[in-house]
Image (tube, rainbow, N blue to C red):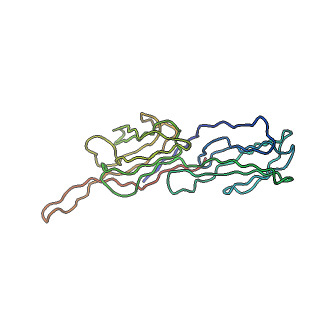
Amino acid sequence: MRRIYTLALMGAGALAVPASASAATAALDKPCYIAGQQGIFAGFGFAPNAVVSITNADLGSTTATTDATGSFAKPFSAPDSKLTGPGSRDIVFTATQSTNPANTASATSKVTTLEFATNKGTLSPKADRSWSFSGWQVGKPIYAHFRFRGKTKRNFRMGVATGPCGEFKRRAPAIAVRGRVSTGLWTIQVDQSPKYSVSTIPALKVRTVVFTRFRPRAVTSAAAVSTAALSGRYSFRGY
């Protein structure tokens, strides 16, 4: 099965800077990151021109130096989601002033992967499967475009990606087209455009074969059954 991957950027969130603070505070610039996406961890209310230790369970430790206002902004690359399928988990960054360990602050966000998945197995192409999605643009519908021999047979609206990590789940057929499903090579492209385009970004694409197999019904006859095999998980990791 050939897989073609493209990447996406999540919509940027606002970085909140407190007007004044008597103790340290911290913030992350997005409510959710795709694994490998660039982000900024910022701190405020530290001593001016002080060394600050920054820790994260996935990325380890690093340092930053505050400016004359006691603030810093440290770029980082979001860690892997470490999940076995679509979904999200929390990530925590902590900043501690080296000369005053009591002056510390943490900020929490989430990390996800741009992907979709179905349950594995060879079933009828019309049989419902569990579909799940993560890393898509929040508030926009997710579509699956089913193509056969270079033609789009259906643009199927899966549902709307919800925040903060653009996740969604539903049950739908492996090949969600109307009428008979032709045997042969099908292409499924998942994206957030209501109509298929080869240039749509972000998009995830997978190819699967619908084939006919025969199940013995009696000694002298057999039943033809169309089936489609899907391997389960399609994702893009890091950029």
Please identify the quadrant where the N terminus is shown. bottom left
Residue 52 x, y percent position in the rendering: 81, 50
Question: As drawn, is 131 to the left or to the right of 184?
Answer: right
- Depth check: give the residue in front, 68 or 142: 68
- The residue that appears at 44% across and 47% down in the rendered structure is 169
Count the numbered circles shown: 0
Residue 62 x, y percent position in the rendering: 76, 53
Placement of 142 over or under 237, stated as above or below:
above
Q: Residue furthest bottom?
A: 219
Residue 223 x, y percent position in the rendering: 19, 57
Image quadrant where residue 232 sits: bottom left
- Depth check: give the residue in front, 113 or 55: 55
Q: Residue furthest left?
A: 220
- Depth check: give the residue in front, 159 or 146: 159
- The residue that appears at 42% across and 36% down in the rendered structure is 196
- The residue that appears at 40% across and 40% down in the rendered structure is 145
Question: As drawn, is 175 to the left or to the right of 52?
Answer: left
Residue 127 x, y percent position in the rendering: 31, 51
